[in-house]
Amino acid sequence: MTPNILVAPCYGQPSARRHFHDTIEGWVPFADDERGPLLTEHQRNALLALHPSGVAHFWGARAGHAAMMSELKRGDVVLFVGDKKVKACGEVGHHFVNQPFADRLWRKKGDVDSFVHVYSVLNVRPVERPKSDLVTLCGYKPNYAIPGQRFLRPGDVPDVLREFGIATSVAEAALEELIEEDLERARRSRTTPVEKAHQDTIIRHTPASTTLTHRVEINLVEAYRQSCLPEVLRAFRTDSDLRADLYRESDDEVEIIEAKSLATHGKVREAVAQLMDYAFHSPRPVTRLTALFPEKPDHDGLSYLHRLGIDCLFHAGDLSFVREPAADTRRAHMIPVWRGA
């Protein structure tokens, strides 16, 4: 699922800068006694479903943007632009119309107009890149002025997401669903001995998206286990009850493998952090760390793994996997670091 990208001016007028500082850089307690009574029951429940702590970032639009706001959907991307920069980015949460709530957030004495449309913003992160990076990527001249609040052209969206390193939870969940279906088909295509099909039973109380992530990782691990038969791969737990996905001992080699549900750069970084933690607690001194993905990471992700001496292993269809190992010299250099020497 490819999201829309909305370009939202945020730093032109003093009032816009104030709004940005208050409700994008700052957090808004929307369920408190001051703002909570201004929400309808549906609005309050929808916000709490996405922001159970009762605080969120918010942005909005005036009544004249009604047609544009009607196209805004959960998981769309917002680029906050101003001061000749892309200041920040975020992901659209719940969108609703509520002028009293918007006035409480943003309207001050002397303001000429009021926001009517309000939307919560998830996963806000600073960008602070020249706006020219955005407009030239979209085929315009570097000094092109984006006219107010606008959606980017659909054809420009993939390049902007890639260049600015943006991955939304909605898009990731949709991709995880496709990957899970593919892995499940591959896993079931081979008859597996009963003892190999056993999975540790873990009771989880998690949001649906988190549960989906775990299902993808479990299927990925099981598919790789099957591809390695008759070699036995197992898991291990650290003293603090953290569980590494796979652990392999073969003569003098000791390998820890960590699976991730996607091959995005964020997931690559997660795998690195977990592998570094597990390596220190390995039952025997570790000699190889491997990150396992449902597809090959991009060049930057692969280079990051290899710089740290970590192998990359990815699914290549059916029960086939491809290993792209780190250089032996790099691995030898990093092993003392992994072991905490």
Image (tube, grey):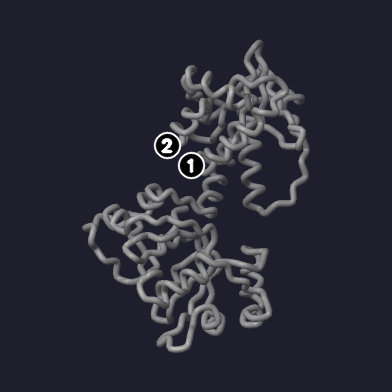
Using a 10 Å C-alpha cutoff, classify the residue at mark 1 as few (fewer than 14 neighbours), some (14 to 19) or many (20 or more). some
Q: Give me the disc on residue 300.
A: 2
Is residue 304 toward the left or the right of residue 134 in the image? right
Q: CA distance from mark 1 to mark 2?
A: 8 Å
Contact between labelled residues 2 and 1, with CB atoms less than 8 Å apart: yes
Looking at the rendered image, the quarter that the C terminus falls into is: top right
Residue 98 spot, x, y in % from top left: 54, 81
Choose between 5 and 177: the one closer to the eye: 5
Residue 59 spot, x, y in % from top left: 49, 71
Q: Say whether residue 9 is visible.
A: yes
Point 64% across, 81% down: residue: 34
Residue denoted by label 1:
265
Amino acid type at image mark 1: His
Residue 227 spot, x, y in % from top left: 60, 23
Q: In terms of secondary structure, where does tag 1 sit?
A: helix
Point 24% across, 63% down: residue: 144
Q: Quadrant of residue 282?
A: top right
Point 29% across, 52% down: residue: 137
Amino acid type at image mark 2: Asp
Q: In terms of secondary structure, where does tag 2 sit?
A: helix
Q: Earlier in the sequence, mark 1 or mark 2?
A: 1
Choose between 79 and 150: the one closer to the eye: 79
Residue 300 spot, x, y in % from top left: 42, 37
Point 62% across, 45% down: residue: 213
